[in-house]
Amino acid sequence: MRILEVLEPSGGGSGRHFVDLCAGLKARGHAVTAVYSPVRAEERFVRELMALDLAKVIALPMLRAVGPRDYAAWRALGHVIREEGPFDIIHGHSSKAGALIRLRRPGRHVPRIYTPHAFRTMDPTLSSKGRLVFGQIEGLLGRYLTDRLICVSKSEYDHALRLGIPENKLTVVVNGVGAPPTGQRQEIRNLFGLPQDALVFGFIGRLSTQKAPERLIAAFAAVARSAPEARLLMIASGELEADVRHQIETAGLTDRVVIDAALPGSAALQAIDVLVVTSRYEAMSYVMLEAAAAGLPLILTDVGGTSNVLDHDVNGFIVPNTDDTAALTAAMARLCDTATRARLAAAASGRSGRYGVDAMVDQTIDVYRQVLAGRGATRD
């Protein structure tokens, strides 16, 4: 197949998925053209995407916010489809790229596949007006201009149904990850000045409202007072970094918390004893999957994808998705107990082989083939 993959955020979990999918498609003999937006692109994402040696990689500016520049992006994307095609499948990732690839002229067309990587309407901080507007847009595009919508978790699937998207347009394909790196625990701890005998809680993700890092800092501050061996490693950057650093300084934790964005999160997991995800919403977090594949105990807020990787009090703890950090603090305190941590770590290690990337790629290809078989191989 000749496939066009399009992404706007160009980083984070959706970026990880995009790179893994493009690599897997190429490895299976498909010709992949990748379009990404350089506006919010992470350097590591661009470097990894370029290293795949795809048929073509195109930087096309797309903005996250809805605005007049979307028309220029839509026209530019249309030019790519005409000039670089014909394609058998066009697959948009994230809400902006998903909308741009699906807005098209009526008539015969290349099948459009859409992976939201968390609907905007899954954000509990979204205003009621925003929820109404974005929900109507997603519902209309999903019903009338989408050949198949790929959800990355059952919770995202259920949310799509609530938006009015027909069940026959929906498929669940859970994200997958490669084998985690090993053998560098001591080296990475030395790199960050973390004692070899320290209990290291880890946070990996954007410092953004969605990821709620302020919850973790507040809980860690409470735990750190009675656990002198505890440290916090945050592999992160983002728009809230200045606020997070100020919170750390105010709490007197500058010698207990490390923030770094240079090391890949998958590598940093080797130095972490417990992964903590404090997100307000997710579809299926790659960080959760990578930590589960690495056999780490988890503390996760009750968001999309949590049930895919965590059984409460078996391989970690699920805590309420709230800004009240009492339950989060209590869960972190329980993981400070050596016996409890050993029990959860043993269970986590036993489940670590469930989250492979090959299944994700193969299931996505199956979706492409089902759509083509159902519609016939039409091309723009």
Image: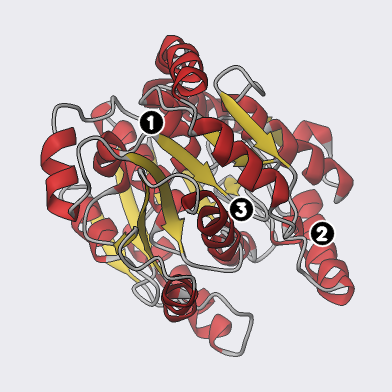
| Residue 356 x %, y % | 40, 22
Q: Are marks 2 and 1 in contact (CB under 8 Å)?
A: no
> Viewer-nearest of labels 2 and 1?
1
- Crowding at mark 2 (Cα within 10 Å: few <14, some 14-19, many 20+): some
Q: Residue at x 19, y 58 (%)?
A: 47
The residue wearing badge 1 is 177
Image height check: is 349 above or below 372? above
> Viewer-nearest of labels 2 and 3?
3
* Name of the residue lying farthest toward the bottom: 68
Q: Nearer the viewer, residue 71 or 235?
A: 235
The three-letter code of the residue at mark 3 reads Ser
- Crowding at mark 1 (Cα within 10 Å: few <14, some 14-19, many 20+): many
The residue wearing badge 2 is 140
Of mark 2 and mark 3, the one earlier in the sequence is: 2
> Viewer-nearest of labels 3 and 1?
3
The residue wearing badge 3 is 279
Disc 3 versus disc 1: distance between alpha carbons? 20 Å
